[in-house]
Every structure is written in C-alpha cells, then in structure tokens.
Amino acid sequence: MLFGIPKECPDRERCQEKRVGLSPGGVRDLVEAGAAVIVESGAGAAAGFLDEVYRKAGAQVAYSSEEVFGRADVVVKIAAPTPREIMLLRPEACVLAFWHMAVLWDTVQEQLQKARVTAIGYEVIQEEDGVLPILRVSSEIAGMLAPQIAGRLLETEFGGIGILLAGAPGIPPADVVIVGGGTLGFYAARAFLGLCCGVHVLDISKKRLELLDRYFEGRVVTALATKENVEKFVSFADVVVGAVLHPGEVAPIVVTQEMVRKMRPGRAILDFSYDQGGCVETTRLQGPSGGIFVREGVLHFAVPNSPSLVARSATHAQTHAILPYVLDLQAKGTAKAIKDNASLKSGCYVYQGHVVRQGFGPSVINLDELLA
C-alpha cells in the first residue's frame, strides 16, 4: 500500500498545526513492513524533520499536496483535511486524522460521501478496556503543557495579573481549578502540583475523585462538579483548566459566562476542550477560530491543537500511538484491518462514502454489513 503524509493545512489562515502525521522513525518502520510512503516536501519542517531525513527512512518526497492526496491509499494526518483536500483523494482512499466530527461534520459530510473515502478519527479509536490510546497521548501532553501556558498568560507582559505560579517565600502560590479529572486533568494536576500550586480538581465521577485523592495522597482538593461547586471554585481561581471530554460528542458547557464574570481580572482560563466545542461558554463566543484573547477581563487560551506547541515531542509520541494501527492497515489492507481490528472499527466515521457512526445523520449504515 502507498501511505501519504501531507503538510498540515497549508492553505488555512490561523492554522498553527506544526506536527506531522508520522515521524521519520515511524516511516522507517512502515517501509520495513513493505509499504511505500510519500511525504510532501516540508511536511515535517516545523517539527524539525527535514525532507532528507524522510528520504533516508525510505520515503519518496513529493512537491505538491495534490500528488500526495491523489496517489495515496492511506493518508496519515493530524488535522482533518479541508473539503478541497478531500476532493483530491482517490475513491476508496482512507484518511486517519483528528476529525472531531462533532464540530466538523456539517462542513465535510457532502465531500466525504462524494469522494467515497473512509474517514477514521483518532479521537474515537478505542481499545477494549475503554482507553482512547491516541487521544490519550494528546491529553497527556496538553496536561503537562498547562503550567507553561498558564505561567505565560499570567505574566504582566502578556496582560495577566503578574503572579508567579509557584509563589515565593512569603507569597502564596497560584490557585488552579481543573474541571475534569480524566487523563488531561490528571497530568495537569500533577504538573501544577510539581510547582507547589494549590490544585483543585472537579469531576462528575466520585470514583474518579477517589482515585485522584489516593494517588496524590490528599495534596489535591477534590470536589464533585456540581453547578454550585464549579461556581464557587472558579470564583477564586487564578487559573481554570477546562478538561471535559465526552468522546465523539460536543463538550458540554460547564463554566458559564456568568461564572467567568465573577473571576478576578487578569486571571487565566485554558479551555482544552475547545477541539470539541469548548466547555467554557466564553470560549465558544470566540467562534471556531479560537486563539488567545481577553473576555470579561480574563485571559483565555482556546487553541484546539495545543500539543503542536511542542511539535517535535508531540509528533514522536503521536507516532508511537498511531503506528500499530498503520502497520495493521499495511499488513491486511483497509477493509480487512477494519473488520479484524475492533479499535480501528470503533474509529470509523465514514466507510467508502457511507456514514457508519451513529449520531451523524439519519442514513447510518451498519459497518459490519459493508465489510461482509
């Protein structure tokens, strides 16, 4: 099979995606498994992977996205392709990406069906134990990044109140409120705690809160994410981290605009649920472009691809998570790999132009019938 790795959204304004579909090491493993790989020139440059390194790994280097999309049996991306890119694909091609269909479906539905392609979303690939292995990697990185981002937002030069996250002798550290105690929330809590911040985690699951309490040995304050508690904790927070996830669905609004109004000026909100619509009402008001902005006197970080801030590390980590599925596609072909691999099947939104995932239109077709 021929695998294509294009540049990420080169024609989109404001797109800051710096990761690349596979690292050169991942390409080497794929080539050694018998695949042919074509990489668009410059695809890995922002992450520090030059064309020559991909050539040494066994890939061909193409000089146009049209060639990559038009020739590949399987396209390996990070961001979902644009409607124009979808129409470049050959029929029955497969695209792996963070599709986030819950917020993208209306803009790509017609193109996917017309092009008769297969769309597999990393964010909904799920193992038998319930783990989302590829999304988990992004969540881990985003959680560990949270203090770096928050620290910059709180700096005076950046427009923040001008406080040090870790505090200093005689000066208390920042209070951080994390809404959502899943993977991202856990790694954010661990990272902020390493800076001696006051960390508070809210979640709807009492069992999850009990696990966090045991792991952190009581050093993190936990509370159920009732509306009353969210309002109380957000009001005194120096940093609010939105880490709410409903896999494959639009994130619910948990922090309302009224709650944001009660925050002290110059504080910061990091809405890491923004790729699924956002769990903070004031980030949704910014619209699909997101970004870093001030609303109600509070600095907001609403960037859907925050791991791209550390593009090289994130690409390595993402490749490790993606590679088993890509190798399975190479070994068996798209149809058989999806049929045999329950995790790949769980990530399938569209198969050869047919909608196969519930919640995306009335004409959902049973995937097993198509694969029979």
Image (spheres, rainbow, N blue to C red):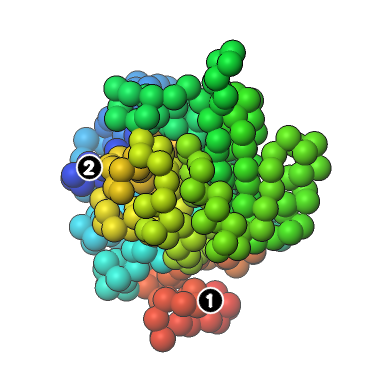
* SS type, badge 1: helix
Say few, some or many: other residues with alpha carbon within 10 Å of mark 2 (under 14 / 14 to 19 / 20 or more). few
Looking at the image, can residue 327 be seen?
A: no
Position in image of residue 102 (x %, y %) = 41, 66
Label 2 vs label 1: CA separation? 36 Å
User: Which mark is nearer the camera, 2 or 1?
Assistant: 2
* SS type, badge 2: loop
Examine the rendered structure and indicate whether residue 333 appears above or below residue 7.
below
Viewer-closest of 91 and 207: 207
307 relative position to 179: left or right = left
User: Label 2: which residue?
Assistant: 14
50 relative position to 22: left or right = left
Which label sits on residue 333? none
Examine the rendered structure and indicate whether residue 157 appears above or below residue 239.
above
Instruction: Identify the image quadrant of residue 166.
Output: top right
The residue shown at (29%, 47%) is 295
10 relative position to 187: left or right = left
User: Label 1: which residue?
Assistant: 367
Q: Amino acid at mark 1?
A: Leu
Looking at the rendered image, the quarter that the C terminus falls into is bottom right
Viewer-closest of 236 and 217: 236
Q: Amino acid at mark 2?
A: Arg
The residue shown at (73%, 45%) is 212
Position in image of residue 59 (x %, y %) = 39, 32
- Sequence-wise first label, 2 or 1: 2
